[in-house]
Amino acid sequence: MKGKTILCLMLLPLAALARETREPLTLSAIHAAAREAKVVMELPRWETTTAAIQASEQAAMAEGKRRLDAIAALKPGDITLENSLAALDSAWDPVVLTLARMGIIEATSPDPALREAAHESSRRLEAWLTDASFRQDVYRVIRAYADSSPGLQGEDAMLLKTVMRDYRRNGMELPPEKRTQLQKLKNRLNRLNQEFQKAVREADVELVFTREELEGLPEDFLRNPKLLGEDGRYRLNANVTWQVIEVLRNARREETRRRLVLARMNRARKENVPRFTEMLRTRARIARLLGYDNWADYRTEPRMAKKGDTARRFLVDLKQGLEPKFRDELEKLRLLKVADTGDADARLNYWDVGYYKNQLKKQRFDIDTEKLKVYFELERTLDGMFGVFEQIFGLRIQPVKDDYYRWVEDLRLYVVSDATSGAPLGFVYMDMFPRKGKYNHFAQFGIVPGRKLADGRYRRPVVALVCNFPPPAGDKPSLLSYDQVETLFHEFGHALHSVLTQARYQEFSGTSVPRDFVEAPSQMLENWVRDKQVLDRFAVDYRDGTSKIPAKVLNRLEEARLATIAIHYRGQIGYGLADLALHMTTDDQVFRNFVAVSNEVMSETYLPVPKDTAFVASFGHLAGGYDAGYYGYAWADAIAADLASVFRKAPDRFLDRTAGMKLRREIYAVGGSREVEDSIRAFLGRPRSLRPFFQQLGLQPEKGLGTRAGAVGQVKKAVVASP
């Protein structure tokens, strides 16, 4: 809309007008506001050549070593909080910041040489961090400070507790020979994780289809010049998520859906099957060396679940509670396939679920997801989301208009500020569209964590949202599906969690919270997209600029969501149980046959996995920090539903400023600087409950259980509510 006349602006709806008047800020204005607020707002200096990457890597490691050497040189009588524990938090800074930039370059750079150089640099930086964490001379100083009983309070006490726990988990109490063995194993695991993720990211799985084979796909998709070749055939990539989703939801021909699912589930199979076997063996050896029964127990110890079996029982009990509803939902979809094919014995296959869920929405609920896209033009949706978050969290979100480094031409940069004081809070990059070699899903990447500097100023965070929304095609703007709008709110929630931090130490900055909680504040924000009051702020038909989504359509969308919610969660539970099945054992036979084991778990929990596929070989979460942790999505969903219940009861519901500011203060600002259960209780004003989660699932807890915090027992005793 930029550059339109005043007359055109007057004819636009309020949401579009707001976009035109959202004032861009210059970097000089941002820096002036930062000086006034006594904070540091600096953008990273990005490496643009392979030589620059190598130079940054060497400089970072040298500076990190200098800082650790200073701690190690302390004499017993000279040790203080600031020069030992606090200094350790900042000692990692040079390498952590460089590693974060390498992660962005590897995930987003259009230049294959830069991506490869960043990958190699990341490998060496990870090895440096691992080796440095084993320095006995540094540990002796921190141990001496801890043994002095310093009587710390608040965040300082939390830091000491966390650092000493992590040193123990790093084997610092082991004999030297075992510690050396552990160090080698951890370095090997880091390399395997990186290679696993690289293979998934770089998988290029092209499939060619005719127009007839893509029957049912929307015209906007079929007219996309990036997909349609000169020979009249379409070239799709099974590694590009938005293309896969479009086909699985809309392609009428089962064979088309089957081909795409098989290709996607076998991405990186050749490279990653032997690699993942070695990863499982290495993880098990690390766990045993440290005295844990298995890798899951090691990984869950610092999380809310504490033990692998607690996580597993949560999933198993939820699986059983959902069983009747799950079977009922599957049968409804199968009957749609029966009607569609004329085969009374038709079987619902893995590749059928998305298509018949979409058909159910159309036939039973009169919802055409393709037609809903006209309400979610990307620019209007983005601006509307900003406006909602500005209102409830007391923020101002503005584009940065100066020439800043862009790794792609359409990269965006926003500054988030406090609306009352004007103090800048952080920068958010947004890389919106897919391209070859780019990370192929949706994620927030941390770049600069927040922390208080030695001079008393606060360094504000910088993050990036790496997205893969459908790009504009021809004369059509980028139009998002309803699910993609939920994803946008979710991912920007992670950005808010990062930039609103007030934690003193970077150890606790923003999303540095237990992994089975980290998704909860973002999953909670998906509820905003289901509220008409919120959607009316921006969901307007881009073609006429006035039409909004009718309330009855939103009601049917919610009914449709609940109609297949058990299918959704059983899929999530299947991934979680497969993950735990591989990590709650030290049996090498399981490791050698992990494809068959994971396929069997998923088939028993969800739907039969297609023969001769290996979905685990491209299950990037298992090399990206969610190993023995995928259960955390469902676990966090239970917490998210409870957090959202505060807004449902608030006077202005999901636009309530009082509830929003409390969430900002008690959840986002504190990060991991106190026990997460204390943060949840501070926001809720009571112990957490599973009752809102049961309601979200269509389950009904037994009377009297809804206010108890214990998850496993409540789920097990839940019964299916009437449809």
Image (cartoon, grey):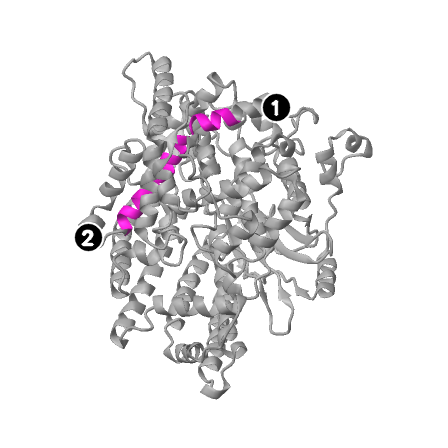
| Residue drawn 47% across the image and 80% down it | 71
13 drawn magenta: no
Q: Which of these two is toward me, 23 or 148?
A: 148
> In the rendered image, which quarter contains the C terminus?
top left
Seen in the picture, residue 494 relative to 317 is either above or below; the reply is below
Q: Which amino acid, mark 2? A: Asp
Count residues near mark 1 (Cα–Cα under 10 Å), then give few for <14, some for 14-19, many for 20+: few
Asked if residue 405 lies left or right of residue 223, the reply is right
> Which label was assigned to residue 672?
none
Q: Position of residue 443 (x, y in %)?
A: 49, 47
What is the secondary structure assignment of the residue under circle 2?
Answer: loop
> In the rendered image, which quarter contains the N terminus?
top right
Q: Position of residue 463 (x, y in %)?
A: 56, 54
Count residues near mark 2 (Cα–Cα under 10 Å), then give few for <14, some for 14-19, many for 20+: some
Regarding residue 502, the answer to whether it shows in the image is yes
Quadrant in the picture for residue 427: bottom right
Asked if residue 450 lies left or right of residue 399, the reply is left
| Residue drawn 56% across the image and 50% down it | 683
Q: Which of these two is toward me, 116 or 12?
A: 12
* Magenta region, residue range: 558-583
576 drawn magenta: yes
Which residue position is annotated with label 1? 551
Asked if residue 364 lies left or right of residue 134, the reply is right
Regarding residue 128, the answer to whether it shows in the image is no
Q: CA distance from mark 1 to mark 2?
A: 54 Å
Which residue position is annotated with label 2? 587
Q: Which of these two is toward me, 384 or 468?
A: 384
Q: Position of residue 709 (x, y in %)?
A: 43, 46
Identify the residue at the far top of this view.
342
Q: How many marks?
A: 2
